[in-house]
Each structure stands twice: as structure tokens, then as C-alpha cells.
């Protein structure tokens, strides 16, 4: 998911302030056009406010509830096993592009029942807007979305696209632009975020011996995942607007307010010693999936994928160390928190 909106520097920080701002959709509206350099339609349900938001969200929710994702666990496990084996099979490789991204895309292919698209999604790289070149561009994604929409309308396939193309929102069939908005966010949201989570897990276990404590049962996998989510905060900030944009001709340049999820995750009034990555942290009300009506719809996907990945690591005999790393860290006060794994290669010990 992209956080590309021009911002004028106004930001809500701190756990309590964020929770109340994220609930207050009247003051801090999501009625905004993000990524306006590469698209001219709304990502749905992300960029609309209640009550319209609720209509989109409730139509999509059944595909993302926990039992719907749990049923894919054995396929996720196979994907994790195959890709880990391949990753460690020969010379050192990049964790992001040779392990995390292919795994996340293969798993998404299972969830959406689109195995035929997996290689194409992988070829886009972690960010769909820079799929063809360094310069941000929506052409690749939009070509793809238009072609799968045509297919879905013809009911040629039985997958999430044909379900979405035939959804009715407030009594009306989803339009081509709504289809772009929904499927676009379903492809982008579950991509760089989960890739960063899985890469961060590999990075941490290369630098510590804590995988041994997972193996001995001293650290519980589910507790560890919540802490990885908190510490890595894969989506650190999203914007709101104080002027809802729909129907407005004049939009004030200073309308954006950033919701700094990362500041909530490192709020020392809530988390003891927040800058330590403590895989046994007992209470962990992190804001990595946001809070309020727009709370991440893919949270179960991310948590279940990460759980299966960590179970596969636990059950393997693999132990690894850093071969090369080039990590871009956040600015102070989060300077120990990785922002981007520009290069990360690990090798067996
Ligand atoms: C570690 C992985 C992930 C993180 C950290 C993450 C983070 C977030 C956050 C912070 C929001 C709230 C945005 C806001 O309030 O403006 C959000 C919303 C959303 N996420 Fe995720 N996400 C992750 C994975 C996924 C996955 C796997 C999918 C789907 C495949 C997904 C789909 C969505 C959608 C559709 C929304 C919009 C929900 C709404 O507006 O009601 N996300 N995500």
C-alpha cells in the first residue's frame, strides 16, 4: 500500500491521540485522492468515509475473515517450504525479491484463486507503481486491472475478481472504476507490507539466536508476530484530510494530516522500553493495522501468512546469518527501526 500523498507536515502522534483521531472520521476524513500522480480514482474502501465506506467494507469483509483465510494454511505451508528451500539452495540471494515477495505473491494467488497471475505480480517488484521503471506510473497495474475486469465480466473464471465484478453496492453493480479501486488496493495492500514483515523476521533471526527460543517453545509464535508487527510498523503513516475532497473545487493545500501509526507503536506510555524488539512482549496493542473504521482488512492474511512462515522456520533445521545488509532506518527517534531493506542477503551458518 502506498503512502504517497503530499503532506504539509501536520501529524497526529501518540497512541491515545491517534486512536481518537482515527475514530473521528468527521474531522479527519479519508475522502481524498491519494497517489494522484498515478491514478484518478479512489482506492476502495480506503479512500471513502462512512456511511459509504461501510457499504464497500461489508461487501468485501466475508472474503477476509479469519476462517476464509485459515482454510488456505496448508497451501501457504507448501509455498513457505518450497521457497525457503529454493532460497537457501545455492549462492546468496536477496531476501526481499527472492524469498519474501515470491512467497507473498504465491500466497495471494491461493487466496484470490489466481495462480496464473503470480509470475506477473512478482515481475512488478514490491511496489506496483514502479513496476516498469524508477518513475512512478500506473500503466502496468491499470492494463492488468482492465484485462482481468473484462475476463471477470464474462464469468470465465471462478476467483475473487469475478466475485467483485458482480458485487452490488447499494443496489448497483460495481462500475469499472470501482473495480479498479477495490482490486488495486487488494493487490497493493497485501504486498510491500507483508514483504517487509517477512523480510524483517529473516533479518532479526539472522542477527540473534531467538529462533532457538521459538524452537524450544520459550517464545510463542503468535506473541512474536505481534511484536514484529509493532516494531517493524510496515505502514508507518497514512494521511487524512480536514477538507473532504468530493465535490470540492478549491482544495486547501494544508488539508492533509498524517496519522503516524509508528509513533503510536513506540509510545512509551503504552509500551515498556518500546525501542527494544521484545518477542515475549505480553501486552501489545500496536497500531500497525490502523484503528477505527479503516482498520486493515487484510490483517488475518498478514498474521496467518507470518504464522505459517514462522512455523516453517521453526520446524526446519535452518540457521542463518547476515551475508550482506543495506538497511535504511527511520529518522530519530525511530533510528533503530528498519524502514526499507534495500539489500538483505542471508546465508546458512
Ligand atoms: C503486515 C501487513 C499489513 C499492514 C501493516 C497493513 C496496514 C494497514 C493499515 C495501517 C491500514 C489502515 C489505513 C488507514 O487507516 O488509512 C490498512 C488498511 C487496509 N489494508 Fe492493510 N496492511 C497489511 C496487509 C494487508 C493485506 C494482506 C491486505 C489484503 C490483501 C490489506 C488490505 C487492506 C485494505 C483493503 C485496507 C483498507 C481498509 C478500509 O479502508 O476499510 N492489507 N492496512
Image (cartoon, rainbow, N blue to C red):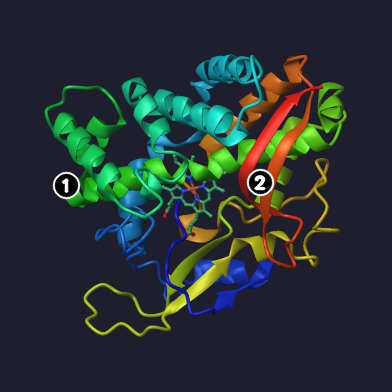
Mark 2, other Cα within 10 Å: few <14 / some 14–19 / many ≥20: many
Q: Is mark 2 within 8 Å of ligand 1?
A: yes
Percent of width and height locating residue 54: 35, 55
Q: Is residue 279 above or below residue 253?
A: above
Percent of width and height locating residue 59: 32, 44
Tell me, yes or no, if residue 167 can be seen here: no
List the residue tagged with mark 1. 176
Mark 1, other Cα within 10 Å: few <14 / some 14–19 / many ≥20: some
List the residue tagged with mark 2. 229
Q: Is residue 150 left or right of residue 181?
A: left
Percent of width and height locating residue 149: 19, 37
Q: Is residue 228 above or below residue 93?
A: below
Q: Measuring 58% from the left and 71% from the top, which residue is drawn there?
A: 20
Query: Which image quarter: residue 349?
Result: top right
Percent of width and height locating residue 125: 44, 39
Tell me, yes or no, if residue 13 can be seen here: yes
Q: Measuring 60% from the left and 69% from the top, which residue is drawn there?
A: 18
Marks 2 and 1, the one that precedes in the sequence: 1
Q: Measuring 54% from the left and 72% from the top, which residue is drawn there?
A: 21
Amino acid at each position: 500500500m502506498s503512502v504517497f500523498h503530499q503532506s504539509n507536515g501536520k501529524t497526529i502522534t501518540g497512541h491515545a491521540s491517534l486512536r481518537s483521531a482515527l475514530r473521528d472520521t468527521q474531522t479527519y476524513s479519508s475522502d481524498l485522492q491519494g497517489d494522484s500522480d498515478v491514478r484518478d480514482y479512489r482506492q476502495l474502501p480506503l479512500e471513502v468515509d462512512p456511511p459509504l465506506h461501510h457499504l464497500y467494507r461489508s461487501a468485501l469483509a466475508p472474503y477476509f475473515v479469519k476462517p476464509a483465510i485459515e482454510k488456505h494454511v496448508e497451501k501457504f505451508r507448501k509455498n513457505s517450504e518450497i521457497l525457503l528451500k529454493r532460497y537457501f539452495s545455492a549462492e546468496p540471494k536477496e531476501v526481499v525479491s527472492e524469498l519474501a515477495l515470491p512467497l507473498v505473491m504465491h500466497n495471494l494467488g491461493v487466496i484470490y484463486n489466481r495462480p496464473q497471475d503470480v509470475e506477473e505480480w512478482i515481475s512488478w517488484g514490491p511496489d506496483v507503481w514502479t513496476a516498469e521503471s524508477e518513475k512512478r506510473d500506473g500503466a502496468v497495474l491499470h492494463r492488468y486491472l482492465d484485462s482481468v475486469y473484462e475476463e471477470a465480466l464474462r464469468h470465465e473464471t471462478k476467483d475473487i475478481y469475478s466475485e467483485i465484478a458482480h458485487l452490488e453496492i447499494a443496489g448497483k453493480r460495481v462500475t469499472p472504476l470501482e473495480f479498479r479501486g477495490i482490486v488495486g488496493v487488494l493487490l497493493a495492500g497485501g504486498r510491500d507490507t507483508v514483504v517487509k514483515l517477512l523480510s524483517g523476521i529473516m533479518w532479526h533471526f539472522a542477527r540473534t539466536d531467538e529462533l532457538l527460543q521459538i524452537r524450544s517453545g520459550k517464545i510463542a509464535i503468535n506473541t512474536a508476530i505481534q511484536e514484529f508487527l509493532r516494531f517493524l510498523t510496515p505502514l508507518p503513516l497514512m494521511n487524512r484530510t480536514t477538507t473532504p475532497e468530493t465535490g470540492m473545487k478549491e482544495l486547501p493545500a494544508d488539508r492533509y494530516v498524517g496519522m503516524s501509526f509508528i509513533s503510536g507503536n513506540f509510545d512509551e506510555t503504552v509500551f515498556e522500553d518500546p525501542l527494544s524488539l521484545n518477542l515475549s512482549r505480553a501486552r501489545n496493542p500496536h497500531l500497525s493495522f490502523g484503528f477505527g473504521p479503516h482498520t486493515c482488512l487484510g490483517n488475518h492474511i498478514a498474521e496467518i501468512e507470518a504464522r505459517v512462515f514462522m512455523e516453517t522456520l521453526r520446524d526446519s533445521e535452518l540457521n542463518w546469518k547476515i551475508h550482506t545488509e543495506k538497511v535504511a532506518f527511520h529518522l530519530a527517534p525511530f533510528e533503530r527501526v528498519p524502514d526499507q531493506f534495500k539489500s538483505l542477503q542471508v546465508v546458512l551458518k
